Image (cartoon, helix red, strand yellow):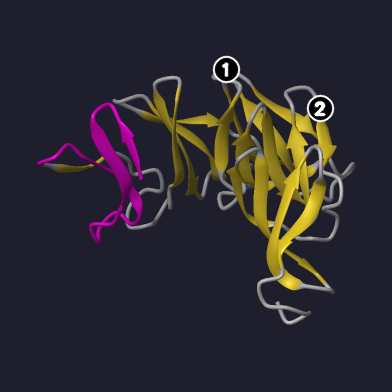
Amino acid sequence: WAVYKNKLYFVGNDGSYGDEVYSYDGSSFTRVSDIYSGSNSSSPKHFTVYNDKLYFFGYNSDYGNELFVYDGSTVSLVKDLADGSTGGINNYAGMIIYKDKLYFQGYASSTGYELYSYDGTNTALVKDITSGTSGSNPQNFIVSGDKLFFVALYKLFYYDGSDVTEASGTSGLNPLFLTAFNDTIYFEGYNSTYNWELFGYDASKGARIIKDIYPGSSG
């Protein structure tokens, strides 16, 4: 869901066109797109308003999963990041605005899934965190203070606009559901001592368990 130019945008299905972008102005419902033509579904996800346009991930058989944009009148492909029908986006990983750019998990055959940015004109690889073709699969993006936090390789990382850094003490915690509160990143994390519990991270204290809610290794 997103509010854009005084309308509500969401994913709808009228039985004829599959899952596509719809709008609601308070009285009328309108289908905005048919990205995957006919009864097929483009399955739009992660609506984000950026630079007075509505961005989202969508799918069709020509491009796979890619980044699309709607300017209030026309839906268009931003870039075929991975040429042809190979998807250039992990549409489940989300996207976020940070320092006037969009960030998301993008794909190239040379890097695998890594952190990408889009500034309204150009799409760029931010960091090949796992060098080579394996990919680090960054996801669960959240902004706290002046940093962009995300999960990759079962660890917490942050990006400060110039470099990507692994957050100390988070290796193997497999952080989930990141939330920023009082300068601390809270998340559900795992280790063999506590199982799944509430953990936190900040720059001064590093990663630590906040509370062993279910005492012992049962989690």
Q: Quick one: label 1, few (<14), some, or many (20+) residues within 10 Å?
A: few
Residue 137 in sight:
no
Determine the residue positioned at 78% across, 22% down: 162
Q: Classify mark 1: helix, strand or loop.
A: loop
Q: Classify the position of the C terminus by image quarter.
A: bottom right
Q: Is residue 61 left or right of residue 20?
A: right
Q: Is residue 182 left or right of residue 157?
A: left
Q: Earlier in the sequence, mark 2 or mark 1?
A: 1
Residue 41 in sight:
yes
Place residue 164 in its image quadrant.
top right
Q: Which residues are magenta?
A: 1-27
Does 80 sit above or below residue 171? above
User: Residue 163 got which mark?
Assistant: 2
Determine the residue positioned at 74% across, 32% down: 159
Q: Quick one: label 2, few (<14), some, or many (20+) residues within 10 Å?
A: few
Mark nearest the camera among 2 and 1 is 2
Q: Is residue 17 magenta?
A: yes
* Mark 1: amino acid: Thr
Identity of the residue furthest to the top in this view:
121
Whole-angstrom CA distance, mark 2 to mark 1, is: 21 Å
- Position of residue 82 measured from the top left corner of the image (x, y, whole percent): 66, 39
* Mark 2: amino acid: Asp
Residue in the foreground of this view, choosing between 20 and 206: 206
- Position of residue 19 measured from the top left corner of the image (x, y, whole percent): 35, 55
Residue in the foreground of this view, choosing between 217 and 126: 217
Mark 1 sits on what residue?
121
Q: Is residue 108 magenta?
A: no
Determine the residue positioned at 85% across, 46% down: 133
Determine the residue positioned at 31% across, 35% down: 3
Does 74 sit above or below residue 191? above
